[in-house]
Amino acid sequence: DKQCSLLLEFASRFPLPHGARFSYGTAGFRSDGSILASTVFRAGILAALRSLKTSSTVGLMITASHNPVSDNGVKIADPDGGMMTQRWEPFADAIANAPDPEHLLQLVKDFVKEENIPFGGEQSAEVLLGRDTRPSGETLLKAAKHGINAIIGAVAVDMDILTTPQLHWMVRIKNKGMPASESDYLSQLSKSFSCLIDLVPKERVADCSDTKLVVDGANGVGGEKLEQLKKMLTGLDICVRNTGKKGEGVLNEGCGADFVQKEKITPSGFGPDDVGIRCASLDGDADRLVYFLISSSSSKNIDLIDGDKILSLFAVFIKEQFDILNNNSDSDNKLAVRIGIVQTAYANGASTSYLKQLGLEVVLTPTGVKFLHKEAAKYDIGIYFEANGHGTILFSESFLLSLEARSKELASTSSGSESHKAVLRLLAVSQLINQAVGDALSGLLLVEAVLQYKGWSIKRWNELYQDLPSRQLKVKVVDRNAVVTTNAETKVAKPLGLQELIDAETAKHPHGRCFVRPSGTEDIIRVYAEASTQEAADSLARSVVQLVD
Ligand code: 16G
Ligand code: ZN
Protein backbone atom coordinates (compact mmCIF):
# COMPACT_ATOMS: atom_id res chain seq x y z
CA ASP A 1 0.00 0.00 0.00
CA LYS A 2 0.90 3.69 0.06
CA GLN A 3 2.57 3.62 3.49
CA CYS A 4 4.78 0.68 2.59
CA SER A 5 5.96 2.09 -0.69
CA LEU A 6 6.67 5.46 0.90
CA LEU A 7 8.80 3.88 3.59
CA LEU A 8 10.67 1.73 1.08
CA GLU A 9 11.34 4.69 -1.18
CA PHE A 10 12.65 6.95 1.59
CA ALA A 11 14.70 4.16 3.17
CA SER A 12 16.47 3.48 -0.11
CA ARG A 13 17.95 6.99 0.11
CA PHE A 14 19.63 6.19 3.45
CA PRO A 15 21.56 2.95 3.00
CA LEU A 16 23.22 1.36 6.02
CA PRO A 17 27.00 1.98 5.90
CA HIS A 18 28.93 -1.19 5.20
CA GLY A 19 30.01 -3.11 8.28
CA ALA A 20 28.57 -0.63 10.78
CA ARG A 21 26.69 -1.73 13.92
CA PHE A 22 24.63 0.63 16.03
CA SER A 23 23.34 0.25 19.53
CA TYR A 24 20.94 2.48 21.45
CA GLY A 25 23.22 2.82 24.47
CA THR A 26 22.95 4.86 27.67
CA ALA A 27 22.61 8.04 25.65
CA GLY A 28 21.02 6.93 22.38
CA PHE A 29 22.94 6.14 19.19
CA ARG A 30 26.43 7.62 18.94
CA SER A 31 29.07 7.39 16.28
CA ASP A 32 31.16 9.36 13.84
CA GLY A 33 28.83 11.97 12.37
CA SER A 34 29.68 10.99 8.82
CA ILE A 35 28.14 7.52 9.06
CA LEU A 36 25.00 8.34 11.01
CA ALA A 37 22.50 9.38 8.31
CA SER A 38 20.80 5.99 8.07
CA THR A 39 20.66 5.72 11.87
CA VAL A 40 19.12 9.16 12.28
CA PHE A 41 16.66 8.47 9.46
CA ARG A 42 15.57 5.33 11.28
CA ALA A 43 15.44 7.18 14.60
CA GLY A 44 12.99 9.52 12.84
CA ILE A 45 10.78 6.52 12.06
CA LEU A 46 11.16 5.36 15.66
CA ALA A 47 10.13 8.77 17.02
CA ALA A 48 7.10 8.97 14.73
CA LEU A 49 5.95 5.53 15.88
CA ARG A 50 6.51 6.50 19.51
CA SER A 51 4.32 9.55 18.98
CA LEU A 52 1.61 7.47 17.29
CA LYS A 53 1.71 4.92 20.09
CA THR A 54 1.41 7.54 22.86
CA SER A 55 -0.86 9.99 20.97
CA SER A 56 1.51 12.71 22.22
CA THR A 57 4.35 14.86 21.02
CA VAL A 58 7.82 13.31 21.35
CA GLY A 59 11.31 14.73 20.77
CA LEU A 60 14.34 13.79 18.70
CA MET A 61 17.68 15.35 19.62
CA ILE A 62 20.79 15.24 17.47
CA THR A 63 23.86 15.58 19.67
CA ALA A 64 26.96 13.77 20.89
CA SER A 65 27.15 15.80 24.09
CA HIS A 66 30.75 16.01 25.39
CA ASN A 67 32.24 13.82 22.64
CA PRO A 68 34.53 15.22 19.92
CA VAL A 69 33.10 17.59 17.33
CA SER A 70 33.30 14.96 14.55
CA ASP A 71 31.00 12.62 16.50
CA ASN A 72 27.28 12.89 16.55
CA GLY A 73 24.31 11.01 17.93
CA VAL A 74 20.57 10.85 18.27
CA LYS A 75 18.15 10.12 21.07
CA ILE A 76 14.41 10.20 21.59
CA ALA A 77 12.52 12.04 24.32
CA ASP A 78 9.29 10.46 25.56
CA PRO A 79 6.07 12.49 26.04
CA ASP A 80 6.93 13.36 29.67
CA GLY A 81 10.24 14.82 28.48
CA GLY A 82 12.28 11.93 29.91
CA MET A 83 14.34 9.37 28.02
CA MET A 84 12.54 6.99 25.66
CA THR A 85 11.22 3.94 27.49
CA GLN A 86 13.79 1.17 27.72
CA ARG A 87 11.17 -1.26 26.48
CA TRP A 88 11.59 0.16 22.98
CA GLU A 89 15.38 0.00 22.90
CA PRO A 90 15.56 -3.51 21.36
CA PHE A 91 13.34 -2.31 18.50
CA ALA A 92 15.54 0.78 18.12
CA ASP A 93 18.59 -1.47 17.81
CA ALA A 94 16.85 -3.79 15.37
CA ILE A 95 15.76 -1.09 12.92
CA ALA A 96 19.08 0.76 13.14
CA ASN A 97 20.83 -2.37 11.93
CA ALA A 98 18.29 -3.59 9.35
CA PRO A 99 20.45 -4.40 6.30
CA ASP A 100 18.07 -3.03 3.62
CA PRO A 101 14.72 -1.25 3.13
CA GLU A 102 12.75 -4.51 2.88
CA HIS A 103 14.06 -5.78 6.22
CA LEU A 104 13.40 -2.40 7.76
CA LEU A 105 9.81 -2.39 6.53
CA GLN A 106 9.24 -5.91 7.82
CA LEU A 107 10.56 -4.98 11.28
CA VAL A 108 8.31 -1.92 11.38
CA LYS A 109 5.27 -3.94 10.26
CA ASP A 110 5.86 -6.61 12.90
CA PHE A 111 6.40 -4.03 15.61
CA VAL A 112 3.31 -1.91 14.91
CA LYS A 113 1.25 -5.08 15.02
CA GLU A 114 2.82 -6.28 18.25
CA GLU A 115 2.48 -2.85 19.92
CA ASN A 116 -0.92 -2.12 18.42
CA ILE A 117 0.24 1.14 16.91
CA PRO A 118 -2.30 2.97 14.71
CA PHE A 119 -0.34 2.86 11.49
CA GLY A 120 -1.16 3.90 7.94
CA GLY A 121 -2.52 7.42 8.42
CA GLU A 122 -5.44 6.86 10.82
CA GLN A 123 -3.82 9.09 13.40
CA SER A 124 -1.48 12.07 13.49
CA ALA A 125 1.91 12.23 15.18
CA GLU A 126 4.26 15.06 16.06
CA VAL A 127 8.02 15.06 16.63
CA LEU A 128 9.99 18.10 17.83
CA LEU A 129 13.49 18.12 16.38
CA GLY A 130 16.55 19.76 17.88
CA ARG A 131 20.27 19.67 17.28
CA ASP A 132 23.41 21.02 18.90
CA THR A 133 26.04 23.10 17.05
CA ARG A 134 27.92 20.20 15.42
CA PRO A 135 28.54 20.77 11.70
CA SER A 136 27.13 17.34 10.79
CA GLY A 137 23.89 18.22 12.58
CA GLU A 138 22.25 20.03 9.70
CA THR A 139 22.38 17.10 7.26
CA LEU A 140 21.43 14.66 9.99
CA LEU A 141 18.43 16.77 10.88
CA LYS A 142 17.23 16.43 7.29
CA ALA A 143 17.63 12.66 7.55
CA ALA A 144 15.50 12.70 10.70
CA LYS A 145 12.80 14.68 8.89
CA HIS A 146 12.75 12.10 6.12
CA GLY A 147 12.33 9.36 8.69
CA ILE A 148 9.39 11.14 10.27
CA ASN A 149 7.85 11.95 6.90
CA ALA A 150 8.13 8.29 5.92
CA ILE A 151 5.31 7.65 8.39
CA ILE A 152 1.98 8.92 7.07
CA GLY A 153 0.33 11.35 9.46
CA ALA A 154 3.57 12.27 11.25
CA VAL A 155 4.74 15.87 11.31
CA ALA A 156 8.28 17.04 12.03
CA VAL A 157 8.67 20.39 13.79
CA ASP A 158 12.18 21.77 13.40
CA MET A 159 13.17 23.68 16.57
CA ASP A 160 16.64 24.36 15.16
CA ILE A 161 19.68 24.63 17.47
CA LEU A 162 18.84 23.88 21.12
CA THR A 163 20.43 22.47 24.23
CA THR A 164 19.35 18.90 24.92
CA PRO A 165 17.43 19.91 28.06
CA GLN A 166 15.59 22.67 26.18
CA LEU A 167 14.20 20.13 23.75
CA HIS A 168 13.18 17.75 26.56
CA TRP A 169 11.53 20.66 28.37
CA MET A 170 9.59 21.67 25.26
CA VAL A 171 8.25 18.16 24.76
CA ARG A 172 7.14 17.95 28.37
CA ILE A 173 5.48 21.38 28.45
CA LYS A 174 3.85 20.96 25.04
CA ASN A 175 2.17 17.76 26.23
CA LYS A 176 0.83 19.63 29.24
CA GLY A 177 -0.88 21.91 26.75
CA MET A 178 1.19 24.95 27.70
CA PRO A 179 3.21 27.33 25.52
CA ALA A 180 6.58 25.68 24.90
CA SER A 181 8.72 27.91 22.73
CA GLU A 182 12.31 28.83 23.48
CA SER A 183 11.23 32.21 24.79
CA ASP A 184 8.76 30.51 27.14
CA TYR A 185 11.65 28.43 28.44
CA LEU A 186 13.91 31.42 28.93
CA SER A 187 11.24 33.48 30.64
CA GLN A 188 10.26 30.64 33.00
CA LEU A 189 13.91 30.33 34.06
CA SER A 190 14.51 34.03 34.51
CA LYS A 191 11.22 34.63 36.35
CA SER A 192 11.66 31.82 38.84
CA PHE A 193 15.28 32.85 39.38
CA SER A 194 14.32 36.41 40.22
CA CYS A 195 11.58 35.09 42.49
CA LEU A 196 14.23 33.16 44.46
CA ILE A 197 16.50 36.20 44.60
CA ASP A 198 13.64 38.34 45.94
CA LEU A 199 13.24 35.78 48.71
CA VAL A 200 16.87 36.00 49.87
CA PRO A 201 16.75 37.02 53.56
CA LYS A 202 17.46 40.74 53.90
CA GLU A 203 20.31 40.27 56.37
CA ARG A 204 22.12 38.11 53.82
CA VAL A 205 21.78 40.42 50.87
CA ALA A 206 24.86 42.31 52.11
CA ASP A 207 26.97 39.14 51.83
CA CYS A 208 26.02 38.76 48.18
CA SER A 209 28.52 41.17 46.70
CA ASP A 210 30.23 38.19 45.11
CA THR A 211 28.01 38.16 42.01
CA LYS A 212 30.69 37.55 39.38
CA LEU A 213 30.54 34.20 37.62
CA VAL A 214 32.67 33.06 34.68
CA VAL A 215 31.21 30.25 32.58
CA ASP A 216 32.99 27.90 30.17
CA GLY A 217 30.44 27.16 27.42
CA ALA A 218 32.45 24.22 25.95
CA ASN A 219 32.31 26.06 22.62
CA GLY A 220 28.87 24.59 22.22
CA VAL A 221 25.22 25.47 22.25
CA GLY A 222 25.08 26.19 25.99
CA GLY A 223 27.32 29.24 25.80
CA GLU A 224 25.18 30.76 23.08
CA LYS A 225 21.95 30.18 25.03
CA LEU A 226 23.45 31.49 28.24
CA GLU A 227 24.34 34.75 26.45
CA GLN A 228 20.65 35.05 25.62
CA LEU A 229 19.48 34.13 29.11
CA LYS A 230 21.82 36.48 30.93
CA LYS A 231 20.24 39.51 29.25
CA MET A 232 17.04 38.63 31.11
CA LEU A 233 18.67 38.35 34.56
CA THR A 234 19.49 40.92 37.19
CA GLY A 235 21.70 40.51 40.25
CA LEU A 236 24.19 38.31 38.48
CA ASP A 237 27.29 39.28 36.54
CA ILE A 238 27.90 36.42 34.09
CA CYS A 239 30.82 36.33 31.72
CA VAL A 240 30.69 33.53 29.13
CA ARG A 241 33.88 32.15 27.60
CA ASN A 242 34.26 29.39 25.03
CA THR A 243 30.98 30.45 23.49
CA GLY A 244 31.69 28.64 20.23
CA LYS A 245 31.81 31.86 18.25
CA LYS A 246 34.27 31.81 15.35
CA GLY A 247 37.86 31.87 16.53
CA GLU A 248 37.13 30.90 20.12
CA GLY A 249 37.95 27.23 19.82
CA VAL A 250 36.59 23.81 18.99
CA LEU A 251 33.59 22.16 20.66
CA ASN A 252 34.64 20.24 23.81
CA GLU A 253 38.33 20.57 22.95
CA GLY A 254 40.27 21.31 26.12
CA CYS A 255 37.12 22.69 27.67
CA GLY A 256 33.66 21.80 28.91
CA ALA A 257 32.24 20.03 31.95
CA ASP A 258 33.48 16.57 30.95
CA PHE A 259 37.04 17.80 30.43
CA VAL A 260 37.09 19.77 33.67
CA GLN A 261 35.59 16.95 35.72
CA LYS A 262 37.87 14.23 34.33
CA GLU A 263 41.15 16.16 34.02
CA LYS A 264 40.69 18.43 37.03
CA ILE A 265 42.63 21.24 35.32
CA THR A 266 41.67 24.69 34.03
CA PRO A 267 39.86 24.64 30.68
CA SER A 268 41.22 26.68 27.80
CA GLY A 269 40.33 30.34 27.99
CA PHE A 270 40.88 30.39 31.78
CA GLY A 271 44.04 31.35 33.61
CA PRO A 272 45.78 33.24 36.39
CA ASP A 273 43.37 36.19 36.11
CA ASP A 274 40.56 33.95 37.30
CA VAL A 275 42.15 32.96 40.61
CA GLY A 276 39.56 33.03 43.38
CA ILE A 277 36.62 33.68 41.05
CA ARG A 278 33.56 31.44 40.85
CA CYS A 279 33.80 29.46 37.61
CA ALA A 280 31.46 26.93 35.99
CA SER A 281 31.63 24.61 32.99
CA LEU A 282 28.83 23.31 30.78
CA ASP A 283 29.18 20.33 28.45
CA GLY A 284 28.63 20.37 24.68
CA ASP A 285 24.85 20.08 24.83
CA ALA A 286 24.43 21.81 28.21
CA ASP A 287 22.97 18.95 30.20
CA ARG A 288 25.94 18.77 32.56
CA LEU A 289 27.27 21.37 34.95
CA VAL A 290 30.29 21.54 37.24
CA TYR A 291 31.82 24.43 39.13
CA PHE A 292 35.49 25.00 39.84
CA LEU A 293 37.86 27.31 41.61
CA ILE A 294 41.37 28.20 40.49
CA SER A 295 43.20 28.66 43.76
CA SER A 296 46.72 29.44 42.56
CA SER A 297 48.12 31.31 39.59
CA SER A 298 51.11 29.01 39.34
CA SER A 299 49.28 25.77 38.71
CA LYS A 300 46.71 24.43 36.26
CA ASN A 301 45.09 22.42 39.05
CA ILE A 302 41.62 23.35 40.16
CA ASP A 303 39.32 22.67 43.06
CA LEU A 304 36.51 20.79 41.36
CA ILE A 305 32.97 21.20 42.62
CA ASP A 306 31.24 18.30 40.94
CA GLY A 307 27.70 16.99 40.63
CA ASP A 308 27.88 15.49 44.13
CA LYS A 309 28.52 18.89 45.65
CA ILE A 310 25.84 20.58 43.55
CA LEU A 311 23.48 17.88 44.78
CA SER A 312 24.57 18.50 48.36
CA LEU A 313 23.99 22.25 48.02
CA PHE A 314 20.49 21.66 46.66
CA ALA A 315 19.75 19.10 49.39
CA VAL A 316 20.85 21.49 52.15
CA PHE A 317 18.65 24.23 50.72
CA ILE A 318 15.55 22.10 50.29
CA LYS A 319 15.88 20.47 53.67
CA GLU A 320 16.26 23.90 55.26
CA GLN A 321 12.99 25.09 53.72
CA PHE A 322 11.16 22.15 55.31
CA ASP A 323 12.86 22.83 58.64
CA ILE A 324 11.66 26.45 58.50
CA LEU A 325 8.18 25.40 57.49
CA ASN A 326 7.77 22.65 60.05
CA ASN A 327 9.43 24.46 62.96
CA ASN A 328 6.96 27.27 62.46
CA SER A 329 3.89 25.05 62.19
CA ASP A 330 1.98 23.45 65.02
CA SER A 331 2.23 19.70 65.29
CA ASP A 332 -0.86 18.78 63.31
CA ASN A 333 -0.07 21.17 60.50
CA LYS A 334 3.38 19.90 59.53
CA LEU A 335 3.95 19.14 55.88
CA ALA A 336 5.13 15.54 55.59
CA VAL A 337 7.61 15.03 52.77
CA ARG A 338 9.65 12.11 51.51
CA ILE A 339 12.91 13.44 50.12
CA GLY A 340 15.08 10.96 48.21
CA ILE A 341 18.68 11.46 47.16
CA VAL A 342 19.79 9.39 44.17
CA GLN A 343 23.44 8.85 43.27
CA THR A 344 25.55 6.31 41.40
CA ALA A 345 28.58 4.33 42.54
CA TYR A 346 30.73 7.18 41.17
CA ALA A 347 29.47 9.53 43.88
CA ASN A 348 32.36 10.43 46.11
CA GLY A 349 32.05 8.49 49.38
CA ALA A 350 32.41 11.73 51.33
CA SER A 351 29.29 13.14 49.66
CA THR A 352 27.24 10.08 50.50
CA SER A 353 28.34 10.21 54.16
CA TYR A 354 27.59 13.92 54.29
CA LEU A 355 24.08 13.50 52.89
CA LYS A 356 23.30 10.61 55.23
CA GLN A 357 24.57 12.68 58.13
CA LEU A 358 22.01 15.33 57.22
CA GLY A 359 19.44 12.62 57.85
CA LEU A 360 18.57 12.14 54.18
CA GLU A 361 17.70 8.88 52.48
CA VAL A 362 20.33 8.02 49.83
CA VAL A 363 19.96 5.32 47.17
CA LEU A 364 22.32 4.21 44.40
CA THR A 365 21.37 3.23 40.86
CA PRO A 366 23.41 2.13 37.85
CA THR A 367 25.04 4.84 35.71
CA GLY A 368 22.83 6.62 33.18
CA VAL A 369 20.21 9.30 33.52
CA LYS A 370 17.30 6.99 32.84
CA PHE A 371 18.05 4.93 35.95
CA LEU A 372 18.56 7.87 38.30
CA HIS A 373 15.52 9.72 37.00
CA LYS A 374 13.23 6.74 37.46
CA GLU A 375 14.35 6.26 41.05
CA ALA A 376 14.04 9.95 41.91
CA ALA A 377 10.48 9.99 40.58
CA LYS A 378 9.46 7.65 43.42
CA TYR A 379 9.71 10.43 46.03
CA ASP A 380 7.76 13.61 46.83
CA ILE A 381 11.01 15.37 46.05
CA GLY A 382 13.77 13.35 44.41
CA ILE A 383 17.17 14.91 43.90
CA TYR A 384 19.56 13.07 41.61
CA PHE A 385 23.01 13.83 40.30
CA GLU A 386 25.83 11.95 38.68
CA ALA A 387 29.29 13.06 39.78
CA ASN A 388 29.84 14.22 36.19
CA GLY A 389 27.33 17.01 36.72
CA HIS A 390 24.14 15.63 35.23
CA GLY A 391 21.17 15.91 37.54
CA THR A 392 17.99 17.64 38.57
CA ILE A 393 15.24 17.77 41.18
CA LEU A 394 11.88 16.09 40.65
CA PHE A 395 8.69 17.14 42.45
CA SER A 396 5.79 14.69 42.30
CA GLU A 397 2.56 16.10 40.92
CA SER A 398 0.67 15.32 44.10
CA PHE A 399 3.27 16.93 46.31
CA LEU A 400 3.25 20.07 44.17
CA LEU A 401 -0.49 20.26 44.67
CA SER A 402 -0.10 20.14 48.44
CA LEU A 403 2.63 22.79 48.28
CA GLU A 404 0.36 25.03 46.24
CA ALA A 405 -2.51 24.48 48.67
CA ARG A 406 -0.23 25.33 51.59
CA SER A 407 0.95 28.43 49.82
CA LYS A 408 -2.63 29.66 49.34
CA GLU A 409 -3.47 28.94 52.95
CA LEU A 410 -0.41 30.81 54.24
CA ALA A 411 -1.03 33.72 51.89
CA SER A 412 -4.36 34.28 53.62
CA THR A 413 -3.36 33.53 57.21
CA SER A 414 0.26 34.69 57.46
CA SER A 415 1.39 36.25 54.26
CA GLY A 416 5.08 37.14 54.28
CA SER A 417 5.84 34.85 57.24
CA GLU A 418 8.96 32.68 57.25
CA SER A 419 6.83 29.61 56.50
CA HIS A 420 5.18 31.34 53.60
CA LYS A 421 8.53 32.33 52.15
CA ALA A 422 9.83 28.78 52.52
CA VAL A 423 6.88 27.42 50.54
CA LEU A 424 7.31 30.08 47.88
CA ARG A 425 10.99 29.18 47.55
CA LEU A 426 10.14 25.52 47.06
CA LEU A 427 7.57 26.39 44.41
CA ALA A 428 10.08 28.65 42.64
CA VAL A 429 12.61 25.79 42.62
CA SER A 430 10.03 23.53 40.98
CA GLN A 431 9.66 26.14 38.23
CA LEU A 432 13.34 26.90 37.83
CA ILE A 433 14.71 23.39 37.77
CA ASN A 434 14.10 21.39 34.59
CA GLN A 435 11.97 18.44 35.62
CA ALA A 436 12.38 16.66 32.30
CA VAL A 437 16.12 16.08 32.51
CA GLY A 438 19.34 17.54 33.97
CA ASP A 439 19.85 21.04 32.63
CA ALA A 440 23.08 23.01 33.08
CA LEU A 441 21.41 26.39 32.57
CA SER A 442 18.62 25.90 35.08
CA GLY A 443 21.00 24.12 37.47
CA LEU A 444 23.41 27.03 37.27
CA LEU A 445 20.70 29.53 38.14
CA LEU A 446 19.61 27.43 41.10
CA VAL A 447 23.20 27.17 42.37
CA GLU A 448 23.56 30.93 42.08
CA ALA A 449 20.27 31.56 43.88
CA VAL A 450 21.15 29.17 46.71
CA LEU A 451 24.62 30.66 47.16
CA GLN A 452 23.05 34.10 47.47
CA TYR A 453 20.43 32.74 49.87
CA LYS A 454 23.13 31.23 52.07
CA GLY A 455 25.52 34.13 51.61
CA TRP A 456 28.17 31.57 50.69
CA SER A 457 31.28 32.02 48.59
CA ILE A 458 32.34 29.19 46.29
CA LYS A 459 35.07 28.42 48.82
CA ARG A 460 32.56 28.03 51.63
CA TRP A 461 30.43 25.79 49.42
CA ASN A 462 33.44 23.66 48.54
CA GLU A 463 34.08 23.15 52.26
CA LEU A 464 30.73 21.39 52.83
CA TYR A 465 32.81 18.21 52.92
CA GLN A 466 36.17 17.14 51.61
CA ASP A 467 36.23 14.70 48.71
CA LEU A 468 38.03 11.42 49.28
CA PRO A 469 40.91 11.06 46.82
CA SER A 470 39.82 8.96 43.84
CA ARG A 471 41.16 7.60 40.58
CA GLN A 472 39.42 6.49 37.40
CA LEU A 473 41.19 4.28 34.88
CA LYS A 474 40.00 2.43 31.81
CA VAL A 475 40.98 -0.91 30.32
CA LYS A 476 40.57 -1.71 26.64
CA VAL A 477 39.02 -5.14 26.27
CA VAL A 478 37.83 -7.33 23.42
CA ASP A 479 34.39 -7.85 24.90
CA ARG A 480 33.25 -5.41 27.56
CA ASN A 481 30.09 -7.46 28.08
CA ALA A 482 32.19 -10.20 29.68
CA VAL A 483 31.93 -8.10 32.84
CA VAL A 484 28.46 -8.17 34.37
CA THR A 485 27.72 -6.10 37.47
CA THR A 486 25.07 -6.11 40.16
CA ASN A 487 24.02 -3.95 43.16
CA ALA A 488 24.00 -0.69 41.20
CA GLU A 489 27.35 -1.59 39.62
CA THR A 490 29.11 -1.82 42.96
CA LYS A 491 29.75 -5.57 42.63
CA VAL A 492 30.89 -7.86 39.83
CA ALA A 493 28.68 -10.89 39.17
CA LYS A 494 30.74 -12.17 36.23
CA PRO A 495 33.42 -13.32 35.62
CA LEU A 496 33.15 -15.48 38.72
CA GLY A 497 35.83 -14.87 41.32
CA LEU A 498 36.74 -11.36 40.15
CA GLN A 499 34.80 -9.66 42.96
CA GLU A 500 36.69 -11.63 45.63
CA LEU A 501 39.99 -10.49 44.12
CA ILE A 502 38.81 -6.87 44.07
CA ASP A 503 37.66 -7.18 47.69
CA ALA A 504 41.04 -8.52 48.75
CA GLU A 505 42.83 -5.65 47.00
CA THR A 506 40.45 -3.07 48.47
CA ALA A 507 40.94 -4.35 52.00
CA LYS A 508 44.63 -3.46 51.77
CA HIS A 509 43.79 0.26 51.47
CA PRO A 510 42.41 2.40 54.31
CA HIS A 511 38.93 3.75 53.43
CA GLY A 512 39.27 1.82 50.18
CA ARG A 513 36.34 1.46 47.82
CA CYS A 514 36.59 0.15 44.31
CA PHE A 515 34.33 -1.06 41.52
CA VAL A 516 34.57 -1.95 37.84
CA ARG A 517 31.88 -1.70 35.16
CA PRO A 518 31.60 -1.97 31.40
CA SER A 519 31.21 1.47 29.82
CA GLY A 520 27.86 2.04 28.16
CA THR A 521 29.39 4.34 25.58
CA GLU A 522 32.84 2.92 24.70
CA ASP A 523 34.45 -0.49 24.29
CA ILE A 524 36.21 -0.38 27.63
CA ILE A 525 35.94 -1.45 31.25
CA ARG A 526 36.07 1.43 33.71
CA VAL A 527 37.79 1.14 37.07
CA TYR A 528 37.02 3.51 39.96
CA ALA A 529 38.96 3.56 43.20
CA GLU A 530 38.74 5.70 46.29
CA ALA A 531 40.94 5.73 49.39
CA SER A 532 42.18 7.98 52.16
CA THR A 533 45.19 9.23 50.16
CA GLN A 534 45.74 9.89 46.46
CA GLU A 535 48.63 7.41 46.40
CA ALA A 536 46.41 4.71 47.87
CA ALA A 537 43.56 5.45 45.43
CA ASP A 538 46.03 5.32 42.52
CA SER A 539 47.59 2.09 43.67
CA LEU A 540 44.21 0.45 44.29
CA ALA A 541 42.99 1.45 40.82
CA ARG A 542 46.20 0.20 39.20
CA SER A 543 46.08 -3.18 40.91
CA VAL A 544 42.45 -3.69 39.97
CA VAL A 545 43.26 -2.82 36.34
CA GLN A 546 45.72 -5.74 36.45
CA LEU A 547 42.94 -8.02 37.66
CA VAL A 548 40.60 -7.00 34.82
CA ASP A 549 43.17 -7.07 32.06
C1 16G B 1 26.05 8.87 29.10
C2 16G B 1 24.96 9.14 30.09
C3 16G B 1 25.54 9.63 31.38
C4 16G B 1 26.55 8.65 31.90
C5 16G B 1 27.58 8.33 30.86
C6 16G B 1 28.43 7.18 31.31
C7 16G B 1 22.72 9.97 29.63
C8 16G B 1 21.91 11.05 29.01
N1 16G B 1 24.04 10.13 29.58
O1 16G B 1 26.70 10.04 28.77
O2 16G B 1 24.49 9.76 32.30
O3 16G B 1 27.21 9.16 33.03
O4 16G B 1 26.93 7.94 29.66
O5 16G B 1 29.30 6.79 30.28
O6 16G B 1 22.20 9.00 30.15
P1 16G B 1 30.05 5.41 30.36
O7 16G B 1 29.02 4.33 30.40
O8 16G B 1 30.93 5.37 29.16
O9 16G B 1 30.86 5.43 31.64
ZN1 ZN C 1 25.64 16.24 27.59
Image (spheres, helix red, strand yellow):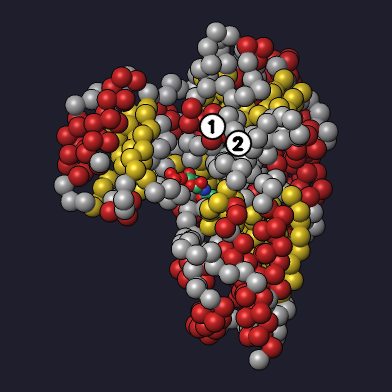
**Res. 549 visible in picture:** yes
Q: Residue at x 72, y 35 (%)?
A: 244
What residue did someone put label 1 on? 259
Image coordinates of residue 161 in percent, x first then y, are 74, 49
Image coordinates of residue 240 in percent, x first then y, are 73, 28
Residue 128 vertical placement versus 263 (above, below): below
Q: Quadrant of the N terminus?
A: bottom right
Q: Which mark is residue 252?
A: 2
Residue 104 vertical placement versus 345 (above, below): below
Q: CA distance from mark 1 to mark 2?
A: 7 Å
Nearest to the observer: residue 390 or residue 325: 390
Secondary structure beneath dot 1 equals helix
For residue 311, side relative to residue 510 (left or right): right
- Nearest to N terminus: mark 1 or mark 2: 2
Kind of residue indicated by mark 2? Asn
Q: Which mark is residue 227?
A: none
For residue 7, side relative to residue 344 (left or right): right
Q: In the figure, residue 203 lies in which quadrant?
A: top right
Nearest to the observer: residue 355 or residue 516: 516
Image coordinates of residue 54 in percent, x first then y, are 62, 72
For residue 195, side relative to residue 538 (left or right): right
Kind of residue indicated by mark 1? Phe
Q: Residue at x 48, y 61 (%)?
A: 20
Residue 253 vertical placement versus 137 (above, below): above
Q: Residue at x 57, y 41 (%)?
A: 68
**Res. 452 visible in picture:** no
Q: Is mark 2 within 8 Å of ligand 2?
A: no
Marks 1 and 2: CB-CB under 8 Å? Answer: yes
Disc 2 residue crowd, few under 14, some 14–19, many 20+, Cα 10 Å: many
Task: Specify the farthest residue to the front.
Answer: 18
Image coordinates of residue 425 in percent, x first then y, are 68, 37
